[in-house]
Image (cartoon, rainbow, N blue to C red):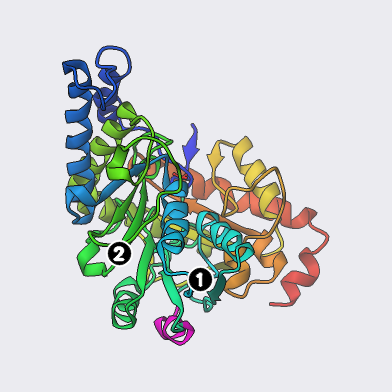
Amino acid sequence: MNIYLDYNSTTPVDRAVLDAMLPFFADNFGNASSIHSSGQRGRSAVDAARDSVAALIGAKTAEIVFTSGGTEADNLALFGSVAASNHSRKHIITTAIEHHAVLNAAQALEKQDIDVTYVPAVASGIVDPQDVRRALRPETILISVMHANNELGTIQPIEEIGRIAAEADVYFHCDAVQSAGKLPLDVNRLGVDLLSISAHKIYGPKGVGALYVRAGTPLEPQFHGGHHERDRRPGTENVPGIVGFGKAAELASVRLTTDSARIESLRDRLEEMLLNSLASVRVNGDRSRRVPNTTNLAFTAAGGEALVIALDLQGVACSTGAACSSGAVEPSHVLLAIGLSPDEARSSLRFSLGRTTTAAEIDRAADIIPPTVERLRALSPRSESAMHAR
Ligand SMILES: *Cc1c(COP(=O)(O)O)cnc(C)c1O
């Protein structure tokens, strides 16, 4: 049995999503910008998908810009806002626990002489809105704070930060890639001007996402080409991908409440079983303010990479946090930001559950994980001292 517990990395395409997409590869292949009826079939499918994506987040249809994914949406939000701003304003605010799509975009902006404040996160993995308020300057262009953290699942106080941004007359971007489909989303209630989502995190295809751009928010396109997406993002529309995103958004709205309750009880069951069967295990981040599907556990003195591989050999797929780039064993920046030591961060694992996770899978995973952790702890040269330190 293969037990996939890595839904925060990506999700399978729902069958209904696949069925909706298939006709748009070879039968209805028209370019959505063409005037003839073949093109117009593509156009109306893209329009319908735009309605569905807008409905998922409480936006108006015209405020949705389709992109190649969450990464591009985040980059468009940051670079597009800075480029559209008056050149005397040179400061943005973000947090230490953002996804690399925001963090590395902010670092690239620093090289263009934009000042960036990285608001720290406390041990809970939740940013203090007052720290955001204190970071404001007269020249602040944008605040960018994620909704649910991809590694911890912790939920950031977006509504409060939205009020702070509005009072200060500063634009507010939110990376909601990990909260879409897990929490109800409403751009007006959240008080955001820009919001990123991605299809493949909500049972849609990879390579398609969207940036919500509140009407009136200045945004300079970052690519140059045709007049697609109301001149905000050129390029021939990815019609099958967008159609799949639309279907995935529809399903996410319909399934949100029932899925969440079921998944949350499975997550809590896994967590309880692991906490009860192993010594020296801790939950990273605030347990009460997180999305229902995620748990991040510090398994003292059992190397995370080795654990992921050992668990994979037994059919359990999980992750050490951020998907690592080029095999580098860097401790997670999020876990370091909430105060874990590099060793603790390296010995932490994220389990993220999803729509197809079953109780039988959770019970089986809870049987497999503890002896695997014990075995790796026994092999670890650090195990003695680390266990005594607690
Ligand atoms: C996955 C993810 C992204 C990137 O989205 P892609 O569509 O994979 O580019 C951005 N932010 C968060 C929080 C994510 O989890």
Q: Quadrant of the C terminus?
A: bottom right
Q: Is residue 81 left or right of residue 111?
A: left
Q: Which residues are drawn in magenta?
A: 127-135
Q: Amino acid at mark 2?
A: Asp
> Quadrant of the rendered structure where residue 17 is?
top left
Q: Does the segment drawn in magenta span residue 166?
A: no
Q: Position of residue 95 (x, y in %)?
A: 51, 71
Q: Front-most of 343 and 139?
A: 139
Mark-to-mark CA distance, 2 and 1: 17 Å
Does residue 263 lie above or below 49 as drawn?
Answer: below
Q: Secondary structure at mark 2?
A: loop
Q: Which residue is mark 2?
A: 193
Residue 279 makes an appearance in the image: no
> Quadrant of the rendered structure where residue 293 is?
bottom left
Q: Residues within 10 Å of mark 2 (few under 14, many from 20)?
A: many
Q: Is residue 250 left or right of residue 80?
A: left
Q: Position of residue 77 (x, y in %)?
A: 41, 57
Q: Which residue is mark 1?
A: 95
> Quadrant of the rendered structure where residue 336 is?
bottom right
Does residue 267 lie above or below 252 as drawn?
Answer: below
Q: Residues within 10 Å of mark 1 (few under 14, many from 20)?
A: many
Q: Position of residue 142 (x, y in %)?
A: 42, 70
Q: Amino acid at mark 1?
A: Thr
Residue 41 makes an appearance in the image: yes
Q: Secondary structure at mark 1?
A: strand
